[in-house]
Each structure stands twice: as structure tokens, then as C-alpha cells.
């Protein structure tokens, strides 16, 4: 998972760039104007901190990427060099210099400070200047970083005061969690998810190679800052499902965004499903029917149900979902037309005022919408007539509202005939030869719905 927009690319691996180390060498290329101090300074794809008392904490096991946009007063020939120098704040004379040649004015020019020049736990200052031939810009204001190559040594602690483990808990209230640093003094926050694969902290790259760093703690779905360094954090979460065994996965993050090993907290939630009741026990196909939805009593007493989500599985147009508001007592009524040609199943969840979504309950019914087919001359699964002997076939409906029938004998092109009296139809057919034969027919309703087909088999004498 990456944070921020993705206008161009996403950095997947933060590694060294194979740069040239130098002490005072000048680039051979030169822009036609006067070089200006680089802007848009970043380190480790995070923002530069110019406050010596609040350095950016970064890992540098493979070196530290530093970058800025070089400038020049005339960009007719936009190629310049960029020089970076870094030093421990405790020893400003111990300078490491890295130079980039042949960079473009206006684009980020990254360089890598080597890992062997950066001690774990040490704070460094670094700055940049643009170089054009024998001319160099002023140095930028220093950026301050503290090298942190070590992640949290222990997993965080996780507890819940209202959903203890190893018992079945009544659902309805958000789950309150307390996350602790477990004695690790540089824990800055926590990452959590209902999935075992936790999001990865990344940085998008924008136009001109400019990083777009985002504070991960701004995404409250997955991150929570500790109340103090090495402290704790509290969460109030709605579980991803309304009942069953739930697991929250958690890891600690230090200031450099190194993660601890994962830990988990597992608990159990009892069912809170609503009830579904049609006004008639067996609603007719295609006929509007009123349904009543009632909340789980314990759930209603915890936080009133405000709405129901009703998904119909089996409708002619595919799955469809309607939202039904509830009254003050948590009960709701709505009219539904069931028109799945083989039947219909309703899946219903309730939503409480505090955001709790119950687990699903279901109600279903099966329908046979195939037509009835009869023939005196050619009985179903029997034999009769003969080659050249005409026979009549009668189609009758099993559901209301039929306006036509479409049929085919032995896979021939389909023929549609209108329904007549009592929504039935009669067709005549003369078999051209003896042997096995079959008829396929389906009905069409007044609304244009094509119902389930029926296959009628017989033998011609």
C-alpha cells in the first residue's frame, strides 16, 4: 500500500544509486547561467527537517538517498552538477561529499550518502549546492537526520476491556483496544489491520521526480500515533463482520518507520442477525410483497438499528441492493418484487447508530417458471405419431403475466407465438422423420422477462 497520489511512479525499493564519491571535484558540464541553490530537499524520500532539535529519523543500512532540484538563472543549457555534503553534528569537520554530474535543472537529482559514513544512532546534517563548471551556488540550509537502523525489539501489547478473548461476547459496541509499546522506548506509533498482511509504507513520486511523502498516521484506518514516545494508543473499531472469530493484527513502528514483528488479538462475537418476515408465507413470482425486518433485541438495546441493507440474489438483472430506513423501534418495512426465474434469496444486515453492521441473515424461495407442455399425439418421454403425422403441443403457464412463448423443435430456429386465452398457446408440428425428438420452450412475461426454459423429450414412431 502506498500513500499519496500516484502521478508517475512508486518507489518499491529504496536502494543506493551508484554515485561517485569526491572531496572537491567540479562537474565538467556547465549551464549557461549562474547556478542557484537547490530546492525541494528530501532525505530517504521524506521531508527535510531544518530544525536541529527535530531531525528526521531514517534507516540507512544501504546508504541514505538525499536529493534536491538544482537551479540556474538561464536554462538554455540545462545540464548542471549537484554536490551534497554531510557531517556528524558532533564533528562538523568530518565531511562526506557526494557529487552528481550531468543533471537537469528543474528535476530532482538524487545522491546516496554511503552507509559506512553513517553511524547508527548518530545525528547528521547535510546540505546541497548546484555546480556549473567552476561556479557553485550557495549551500542550502542544512537538513538534519538521525540514523536509526534498528527496529523495535519486541512486539506490542494488545488488550481490549470490552471484548475479552476466549469467551463469546455480545456484539453491538465498537471494540476498544489498548496498544502498548511493551517497554520499547522508541515506539512512535502502531500499525493495525483485520488482515494479516499489513499495509506497506511507501512514497509516491510526482512530476520532476519530486517525492510526495505522506504522514502514515494520517490514515486512521491502519495507523495510530502513540500518545508519547514509547507510550500507548487506544483504538475504537467496528469489526469487519458482524459475528464470529475476529483477529486484529498489530505491529509497532519506530520514528524511522521500522516495524516490529506482528502480534495479534483474537476474540469472539455472537450473532446479531435481524429477522426477515414476508406478509404472506409464500410470495408469488413477480407480485409485490411487503417484508418486515426486525433487529436483534440485544443489539437494539446496545445501539438502535437505523437501517437495513437488503441484497436480492437471483433477480433477472443480477444482484441488487436496497437500503431501508428503520423506525425508532428498529423495525422496517418495504415492498419487494421477487422475480428470479429459479427463485430468490434475500441477504439482510442491520446497521446501528454507532456504525455496527450485523452479520447477514437470509430468506429465500424457489420458483418454477417453466411452462407446462402437453401433447395427445406425442406424449412426454413416450412415443406416438410417426413421420409426417402432425401433432399439437399446448403450452400453459405456471406463473402469471405470460404474453408469449418461444419454442424450437430439435434445435431448429426459434419461433415465438402469442399467448391466448388463459395465457396458454397451442402449436402444431409435423416430424419429418422417425426417432428421438425434443422441444425446448420458454415463456416471456408482460414486462419482457424471459423465464426458465423447459425441455420436452419424446419419440416419433
Image (cartoon, rainbow, N blue to C red):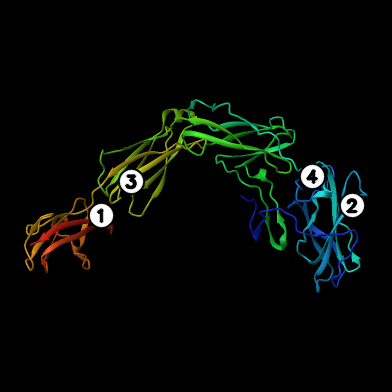
Residue ID for mark 2: 95
Q: Quadrant of residue 259?
A: top right
Residue 336: numbered disc:
3
Asked if the residues shown at circle 1 and circle 2 are in contact, with their CB atoms under 8 angstroms apart, the answer is: no
Asked if the residues shown at circle 2 and circle 3 are in contact, with their CB atoms under 8 angstroms apart, the answer is: no
On the picture, is 86 further left or further right than 192?
right
| Residue mark closest to the camera, 4 vs 3 | 4
Give the CA separation, mark 2 to mark 3: 77 Å
Q: Residue at x 27, y 45 (%)?
A: 366
Residue 147: numbered disc:
4
Mark positioned earlier in the residue sequence (2 or 3): 2
| Residue mark closest to the camera, 1 vs 2 | 2
Q: Nearer the viewer, residue 239 or 265?
A: 265
Q: Nearer the viewer, residue 103 or 71?
A: 103
Residue ID for mark 1: 452
Mark positioned earlier in the residue sequence (1 or 4): 4
Q: Residue at x 66, y 47 (%)?
A: 201
Give the CA separation, mark 4 to mark 2: 16 Å
Q: Secondary structure at mark 2?
A: loop
Q: Nearer the viewer, residue 158 or 261?
A: 261
- What crowding class fits label 4: few (fewer than 14 Cα within 10 Å), some (14-19), or many (20 or more)? many
Asked if the residues shown at circle 4 and circle 2 are in contact, with their CB atoms under 8 angstroms apart, the answer is: no
- What crowding class fits label 3: few (fewer than 14 Cα within 10 Å), some (14-19), or many (20 or more)? some
Amino acid at each position: 500500500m502506498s500513500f499519496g497520489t500516484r502521478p508517475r511512479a512508486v518507489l518499491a525499493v529504496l536502494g543506493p544509486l551508484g554515485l561517485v564519491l569526491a572531496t572537491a571535484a567540479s562537474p565538467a558540464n556547465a549551464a549557461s547561467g549562474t547556478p542557484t541553490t537547490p530546492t525541494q530537499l528530501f532525505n530517504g524520500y521524506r521531508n527535510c527537517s531544518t530544525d536541529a532539535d527535530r531531525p528526521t529519523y531514517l534507516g540507512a543500512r544501504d546508504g541514505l538517498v538525499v536529493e534536491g532540484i538544482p537551479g540556474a538563472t538561464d536554462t538554455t543549457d540545462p545540464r548542471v552538477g549537484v554536490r551534497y555534503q554531510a557531517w556528524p553534528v558532533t564533528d562538523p569537520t568530518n565531511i562526506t561529499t557526494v557529487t552528481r554530474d550531468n543533471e537537469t535543472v528543474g528535476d530532482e537529482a538524487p545522491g546516496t550518502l554511503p552507509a559506512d559514513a553513517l553511524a547508527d544512532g548518530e545525528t547528521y546534517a547535510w546540505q546541497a549546492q548546484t555546480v556549473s563548471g567552476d561556479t557553485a551556488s550557495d549551500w542550502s540550509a542544512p537538513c538534519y537526520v538521525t540514523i536509526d537502523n534498528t527496529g523495535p525489539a519486541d512486539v506490542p501489547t494488545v488488550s481490549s476491556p470490552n471484548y475479552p478473548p476466549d469467551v463469546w461476547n455480545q456484539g453491538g459496541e465498537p471494540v476498544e483496544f489498548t496498544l502498548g509499546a511493551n517497554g520499547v522506548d522508541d515506539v512512535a506509533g502502531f500499525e493495525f489491520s483485520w488482515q494479516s498482511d499489513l499495509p506497506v509504507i511507501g512514497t509516491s513520486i510526482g512530476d520532476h521526480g519530486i517525492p510526495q511523502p505522506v504522514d502514515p498516521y494520517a490514515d486512521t484506518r491502519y495507523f495510530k500515533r502513540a500518545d508519547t514516545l514509547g507510550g500507548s494508543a487506544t483504538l475504537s473499531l467496528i469489526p469487519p463482520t458482524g459475528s464470529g472469530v475476529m483477529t486484529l493484527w498489530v505491529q509497532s513502528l519506530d520514528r524511522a518507520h521500522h516495524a516490529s514483528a506482528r502480534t495479534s488479538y483474537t476474540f469472539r462475537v455472537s450473532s446479531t442477525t435481524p429477522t426477515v418476515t414476508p406478509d404472506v408465507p409464500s410470495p408469488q413470482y413477480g407480485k409485490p410483497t411487503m417484508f418486515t425486518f426486525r433487529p436483534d433485541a440485544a443489539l437494539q438495546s446496545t445501539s438502535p438499528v437505523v437501517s437495513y441493507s437488503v441484497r436480492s440474489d437471483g433477480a433477472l438483472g443480477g444482484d441488487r441492493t436496497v437500503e431501508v430506513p428503520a423506525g425508532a423501534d428498529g423495525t422496517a418495512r418495504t415492498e419487494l418484487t421477487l422475480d428470479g426465474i429459479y427463485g430468490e434469496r434475500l441477504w439482510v444486515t442491520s446497521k446501528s447508530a454507532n456504525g455496527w453492521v450485523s452479520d447477514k441473515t437470509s430468506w429465500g424461495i424457489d420458483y418454477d417458471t417453466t411452462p407446462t407442455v402437453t401433447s395427445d399425439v406425442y406424449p412426454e418421454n413416450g412415443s406416438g405419431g410417426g413421420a409426417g403425422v402432425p401433432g399439437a403441443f399446448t403450452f400453459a403457464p405456471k406463473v402469471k403475466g405470460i404474453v408469449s412463448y418461444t419454442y424450437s423443435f430439435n434445435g431448429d430456429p426459434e419461433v415465438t407465438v402469442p399467448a391466448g386465452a388463459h395465457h396458454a398457446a397451442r402449436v402444431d408440428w409435423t416430424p419429418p422423420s422417425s426417432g428421438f425428438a425434443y422441444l425446448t420452450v420458454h415463456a416471456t412475461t408482460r414486462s419482457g422477462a424471459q423465464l426458465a426454459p423447459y425441455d420436452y423429450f419424446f419419440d416419433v414412431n
